[in-house]
Amino acid sequence: MPDMSLSTSFPGAAWRRRIAPLFLALGLWSGLPAQAGRSCDERPPTPQSFTQGLVLAAQVSQRLEASGAQVVVLARAGQDLSKYHLRYSHLGYAYKSPEGPWRVLHKLNQCGTAVSHIERQGLGEFFMDDLWRYEAAWVVPTPEVQAALYPVLQDKARIAPLFEPAYSMVSYAWGQRYQQSNQWALELLAGALEPQIHNRQQAQAWLQFKGYEPTALNIGPLTRLGGRITAANIAFDDHPNEKRFSDRIETVTVDSFFAWLQRAHLGAAPQRIVLPQGL
């Protein structure tokens, strides 16, 4: 379940001018104006949260460089989802750009709305959120999967057919009305591995055939009603009635994605970095 803590807020301009050259020098900043991936809270990010994000990004960059990989599936812990027994909230594809630095391609919800877009960021920007926990996890796909994904991640024309802007953070894993961030990444992988896939329905059929199993969240009626009323980016009307009214909400999570990659022999065991508290 992707983290929905997004906005356009930054610390002051003077602080941004000081840190931007450091991010650029380390190859952790894309140099492009990003308008997503920030906290929706009125409270602005702090210098400490930026520092922790930068340290985490630098450590991830070092580990990815040492891995020899071109593409990894990279996750962050943007929200506390422990009540759903989930460790990570959001993922994207980190790839070694032709220019050298690592870039992250992922789908982001525009804060407070029911729409989304695709964002291409540096590692620093990806971890710049005021995260719930400064932890990163990634799976290195097999060389065959990396070879299939790498050109797709850099080709807007190949990304577009599997992108749906209508967003719900708990979108039904086998529905096409909405599409959350992890679901987009999963369906994009299907399209990269099977050239005959041209739409979301075909991608989902392939994923079912390959044994992907979504996470079933237990979300009761009062929680569903409250979420639907108070948040534009939460909807349950795409879930089959027999599942929705039995409090079974099946959606794509980082945990289920990682588990399937291993089960399908498409990727290695997850690796992770956890920063000490108060770094």
Image (cartoon, rainbow, N blue to C red):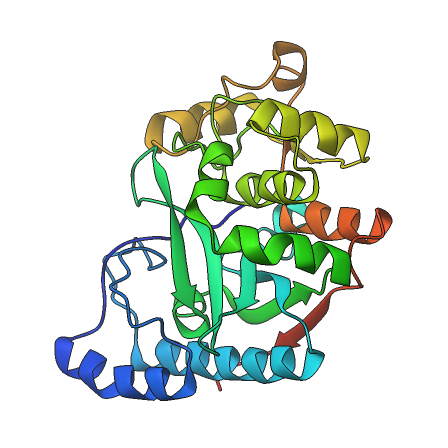
Q: Is residue 261 left or right of residue 254?
A: right
Q: Residue 176 in the image: x percent, y percent?
A: 53, 22
191 is higher (above) or lower (below) than 102: above
Say which quadrant the N terminus sits in: top right
- The front one of 242 and 213 is 213
Residue 118 in sight: yes
Q: Nearer the viewer, residue 279 or 154?
A: 154
| Residue at image coords 85%, 48% | 263
Q: Nearer the viewer, residue 271 or 72?
A: 72
In the rendered structure, the answer to whether residue 40 lies left or right of residue 78 reads left
Residue at 58% x, 22% y: name it. Answer: 175
Q: Whole-percent x and y of residue 207? A: 73, 33
Q: Picture quarter containing residue 151?
A: bottom right
| Image x and y of residue 171, in percent | 53, 30
User: Can residue 90 be seen by looking at this rendering?
Assistant: no
Q: Is residue 160 above or below residue 72?
A: above
Decide which of 21, 49 is in the foreground and name it.
21
* Residue at the spot 57% in from the left edge and 78% down from the top edge: 60
On screen, 124 above or below 21?
A: above
